[in-house]
Image (tube, rainbow, N blue to C red):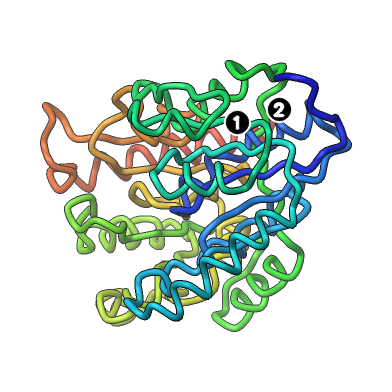
Amino acid sequence: MGNMSQTGNILLIRLKSIGDVLFTLPAVHMVRGNFPGAKITFLTSRENASLLEGFREVDEVITLDRARFQSGNPRAILSEAFSLFRRLRQGKFSLVVDFQGYGETAWLAWLSGAPQRWGSVYGPGRRWAYTCGMTRNDRLHHVDRYLSLLEQCGLRPGEILNEFVLPDDALNAARQFFAAHNLDAGRPTLFFQPFTSTPNKNWPLDRQLAVARHWQARRLQILFGGGSAEQAALEPVRQAGFPVSAGVPLLVTGGLMKLSSLILGGDTGALHLAVAMGRRVVMIRSSVAPGSPYPYQHPDWVITPTNGRDVSSIETSAVIEACTRAFSERAGNASC
């Protein structure tokens, strides 16, 4: 680790995606624990910038506009590249930690001019960019992979903290949404995050509606989330009479999940956000194999198909049973 100042400037890099940025949370806490007086800056893609509002250890955020780099407009690309290079140099960073390890992030780490550059190495051709480069271990959960990188580069491990602090304004906006849709924040609520970024990872919507009707009949409130692009796909949910929050900002979705008793969905950034806020989830995914991004420290919160089949083979009764167990656990913890 060299003689790096305890009060230096530290840059952390993870450009995308929502879940992967969230998986750096415990590593950010470890960096702060080792360098309590340092200024910590986080470089991420512009679309993820709001997420960093819940990283209480981060002092500053630098954003990269990937849309401008992908625009094909040479002037826009050069302008964005020059602006980013200037920000990196102005930061006078003593340490850069590249959690992503892509070709472009390896270059960004090197271009920062930081004397110490640590990174997760995907291939030997990128090791040159780092003063401490560790080969990526695909059998570790993403969170443990990031923590291992820091530890191997010399940081002291401590208590693992996976804690996202939701801003008050996001929680207030969520309360307003509840009130506007005749939902009572004091009543048990089941929140559905019905779609993932990959269609073959989605559990069929008609079965999700069957689960919703099951719990509605048992006096639970039901709320469906989603992104703006999923509005049309969620029309059957509206037709069934359930409220839909698709299109609200990510942190407001966080607030809605924080007000909910249980969150059900696939392998999405929203569910990982719920876990980081201490919420109980039931995640539907293909497996909990080593290295897969299941809810951190909670592989038992995942329901998977049998015999390696597709998630669409999971029966409605199996998901209802998993939700029943989750509600029982919550009731047991509340009575302790």
Q: Which residue is mark 2?
A: 336
Quarter the N terminus occupies: top right
In the image, is 45 to the left or to the right of 29? left
User: Which residue is labeled 1 in the image?
Assistant: 332
Marks 1 and 2 close (CB-CB < 8 Å) = yes
How many neighbours does mark 2 have within 10 angstroms: few (below 14), some (14-19), or many (20 or more)? few
Q: Is residue 256 visible?
A: no
Label 1 amino acid? Answer: Gly
Dot 2 amino acid type: Cys
Q: Is residue 129 left or right of residue 123?
A: right
Instruction: From the viewer's side, name the closer residue of 156 and 274.
Output: 156
Q: Which mark is residue 40?
A: none
Question: Residue at 40% across / 71% down in the picture?
Answer: 227
**Within the image, what quadrant is residue 251 found in?**
bottom right
Instruction: Indicate the position of residue 152 as horizontal and vertical percent values.
Output: 58, 16
Can you give x and y, in whole percent of width and height, for residue 86 in the image? 65, 62
Asked if residue 6 is positioned above or below residue 227 in the image, the reply reads above
> Residue 41: x, y in percent?
71, 50
Q: Quadrant of the C terminus?
A: top right
In the shown orientation, is residue 125 left or right of residue 160? Answer: left
